[in-house]
Image: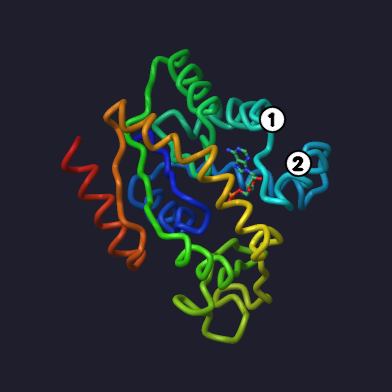
Amino acid sequence: MRLVLLGPPGAGKGTQAELILKYFKIPHISTGDILREHIKNNTALGQKVKEYTDSGRLVPDDIILEIVQDRISKDDCSNGFLFDGFPRTIAQAEALDSILAEKGIELDFVINLDVEDQIIIDRILNRRFCPKCGKIYNLKLNPPKKDNICDDCNVELQQRKDDKLEVIKNRLEVYRQQTQPLITYYNSKNILINVPGDDTPEHIFEQIKKAIEDRK
Ligand code: AMP
């Protein structure tokens, strides 16, 4: 199963990704996670991309495509993968088509999580993550048992640097301008699955599963 998760920041892509990869047993490729790992480890690439991610701008396509080329060539991707946060521009989508065509494969489905701006802003402002295991919490909808402490690791939860109101507004604007056109792009290829993202994670996942099974 070769899938892409599409949707604005805060639509719940990370949460759905966890459920999808457990069910379909495919690796999760989040370009945002890969970039954050580089920034955390202060690699040359991390230093180059930090100014973009901190301000909510898109990292240039050539950098992203190199990361994706490299990741998708690993053995664990031979039976499928789930892209999350990639592609984000038409140029990236076209490049992905070429990368896959060279391998003689294509995407099966692109799942678009549809959520209104106000819900997104509320969700992102309440989003926290565990710096150790990466588990995502929402302080209102899915809070940890102990105040601001990861249930599994017992370490203090953190907020992403780009989850601040000003940066969120910028990320939403960037999404509308550069990423939203991908909905039409994949719709015209007949592989788009639209799922309303304003629901519980379990219910959203059930809808994704059903849509994929119905169209297989
Ligand atoms: P995410 O975790 O997917 O929200 O990504 C966090 C940030 O990483 C974004 O705001 C961008 O600055 C950068 N980023 C992640 N994926 C991409 C991509 N496919 N193209 C360009 N920039 C990206």
**Considering depth in this image, is 214 or 181 the residue closer to the camera?**
181
Say whether mark 2 is within 8 Å of ligand 1.
yes
**Considering depth in this image, is 11 or 14 the residue closer to the camera?**
11
Alpha-carbon span between mark 2 and mark 1: 9 Å
Cβ–Cβ under 8 Å for marks 2 and 1 = yes
- Label 1 is placed on what type of residue? Ile
Say whether mark 1 is within 8 Å of ligand 1.
yes
Identify the residue shown where x is 44% and y is 35%.
181
- Label 2 is placed on what type of residue? Val
Q: Position of residue 69 (x, y in %)?
A: 59, 25
**Considering depth in this image, is 143 or 165 the residue closer to the camera?**
165
Q: Which residue is mark 2?
A: 49
Question: Left of 151 or right of it: where is 196?
Answer: left
Q: Quadrant of ligand 1?
A: top right
Height in image: 189 above or below 32? above
The image's mark for residue 27 is none
Whichever of labels 2 and 1 marks the residue nearer the N terminus, that label is 2
Q: Quadrant of residue 185?
A: top left
Identify the residue shown where x is 49% and y is 63%.
120
Height in image: 90 above or below 85? above
Q: Is the C terminus in the top left, top right, bottom left or bottom right quadrant?
A: top left
Q: Quadrant of residue 158?
A: bottom right
Residues packed near mark 1 inside 10 Å, few (<14), some (14 to 19) or many (20 plus)? few
The image's mark for residue 63 is 1
Question: Left of 156 or right of it: where is 43?
Answer: right
Height in image: 126 above or below 80? below
Q: Position of residue 53 (x, y in %)?
A: 70, 48
Residues packed near mark 2 inside 10 Å, few (<14), some (14 to 19) or many (20 plus)? many
Identify the residue shown where x is 45% and y is 58%.
12
Q: Is the N terminus in the top left, top right, bottom left or bottom right quadrant?
A: top left
